Amino acid sequence: MTIDQTNRVLYNPSAEASIIGSMVMDERTHKHIGEIDAQDFVDPIKRRLFVAIRDLAANKKKVDLITLDDATGNDNKIAVEIMDCMHATPTSANIKGWIALLKDASRRRRVMEIADGLAAQANDRANDMTAVVEGAREALRGTSYSNHAWMDMSALVTRTVDWIERRTKGGEKPIQSGIADIDRIIGGFFPGEMTVIGARPGAGKSQMGMNIAMAGAKAGKKVCFVSLEMIDVQYGQRVFSREAMVNGMRIRNALVDDGEWERIIECMGPLSKLPASFLFGTYMIEDIISEVQRKADTDGIDMLVVDYLQLVRSRQRFESDRLRVANTAHVLKRMTEEFNIPVIALAQVGRDAEGDMPQKSDLRDSGDIEQDADNIIFMHKPRDAEDKWVSPKDCGCFDSIKQAGSEYVVINVDKQRQGQTGYVGVISDAAHMRYVGIDRTGR
């Protein structure tokens, strides 16, 4: 849509200039960067400046005339624009008001774009009007204003007591992991919390993610699984291996016999009814946010599982993987609050200290993950029963688990913001993509 730059309803040049000027002069205003999108700016030079400011701030770099000049290619027009914006900004104290004016003009332009598009689609007889109207509704939802508001102590107390009462009566149930020993430690996965599950390559973190997702879906929860490692059929093979109890390698190598085929077919109906959705081949955090928002608006969502954190990319430019991964962790934590859901983020840990339980310092690329995570769970495969992480009560069954073709895995709850920590041994049946608890009766 072409904007008439004399139309002060759709374009506010003073607000655009003052926002840029404030962010150059006062780094305290950078906390508001996340409230703004580059497309909120009409002026292409100010849009370019905002992107440069956003990227510099994300990389913990100073924002000033020199760094911006360098980040934008030493363009004389940019340098002049920066000076003009600074001169047009008497104080940065009004940054919130200017952002409100910027967002208002941006929303009005967006509504006009939607209206123009709706008119064009309605004028084409080939378009299905139900789909056109639903598309317009979804687009308009994205233009709504934020509903943030202060809550006084009275409201906080009342809401919390109501929550405790519902919880006590069996409502507000967290999503379980599917492994009773783990759930006894963590209590389940609660809305508003991000849980990071870290493991070295090959330790079974994707298998754990599937275990949690399937347990949630079978409990009737709407689970969304974002896979950045597998395509749809690869994931589907794992699902059938788990549910039909068919060795995954037999499926992969097309060695399924008649009995196994029968079990697979029997699983099709129940599996198809599970409220689980999958997103494959989406790597940008911005696209993941958009898809989760769309899913929340249309079907609702109770849990998000991301496999895995370090593979997520961004359209923002970062100087290091550490900063990129830190940004992803920040965004995923914000999603727990925005959508009021638990987010399970699987994470790779470094190969250093191979053969031992990972620690928080081993989380690959970013120590910032620890700050954003409400819970951190690590996984470790001991080589033998002498490993210090093998529980004394499990030493006697360690070898028999191995002989049965399974693995003994230690799950360590290293951090839990609202509860206890601790570790427990479980059985990994990797051939069938599942974890099960250990029967310790009589030990």
Image (cartoon, helix red, strand yellow):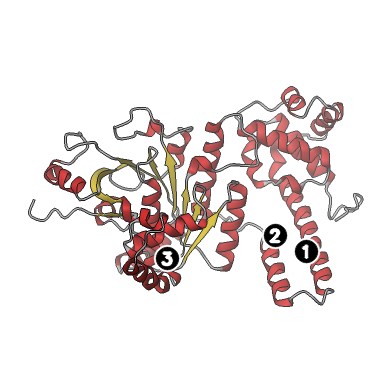
Q: Which residue is mark 3?
A: 221
375 or 316, which is in the foreground? Answer: 316
Q: Is residue 134 above or below residue 393?
A: below
The mark that comes first in sequence, 2 or 3, is 2
Q: CA distance from mark 3 to mark 1?
A: 33 Å
Q: Residues within 10 Å of mark 3 (few under 14, many from 20)?
A: many
* Rendering quarter of residue 279: bottom right
Residue drawn 49% across the image and 58% down it: 233
Question: On the rendered structure, is 361 left or right of 47?
Answer: left
Question: Mark 2 or 1 closer to N-term?
Answer: 1
Q: Which residue is nearer to you in this view: 386 or 422?
A: 386
Split into 4 quadrants, where in the image is the N terminus?
A: bottom right
Q: Relative to residue 114, is residue 394 drawn left or right?
A: left
**Residue 143 bears which disc, if any?**
2
Judged from this view, the residue extending furthest toward the left is 442
Q: Nearer the viewer, residue 410 or 27?
A: 410
The residue under the point 80% across, 30% down is 82
Residue lying at 44% horizontally and 55% vertically, measured from the top left = 342
Image coords of residue 214 (percent x, y): 38, 61
Q: Are circles 2 and 1 on residues that touch, CB within 8 Å?
A: yes
Query: Mark 3 vs mark 1: which is more N-terminal?
Result: 1
Is residue 407 shown above or below 351? below
> How packed is label 2: few (under 14 Cα within 10 Å), some, or many (20 or more)?
some
In 3D space, how far apart are the residues under numbered discs 2 and 1 (Cα atoms)? 10 Å
Can the viewer see residue 175?
no
Q: Quadrant of residue 203?
A: top left
In the rendered image, which residue does mark 1 sit on? Answer: 114
Element type at marker 2?
Answer: loop
Question: Do callouts 2 and 3 mark residues in contact (Cβ within 8 Å)?
Answer: no
- In the rendered image, the vertical position of residue 409 relative to residue 27, given as above or below: below
Amino acid type for the residue under numbered disc 2:
Thr
**Residue 80: horizontal and vertical position, in percent?**
86, 28
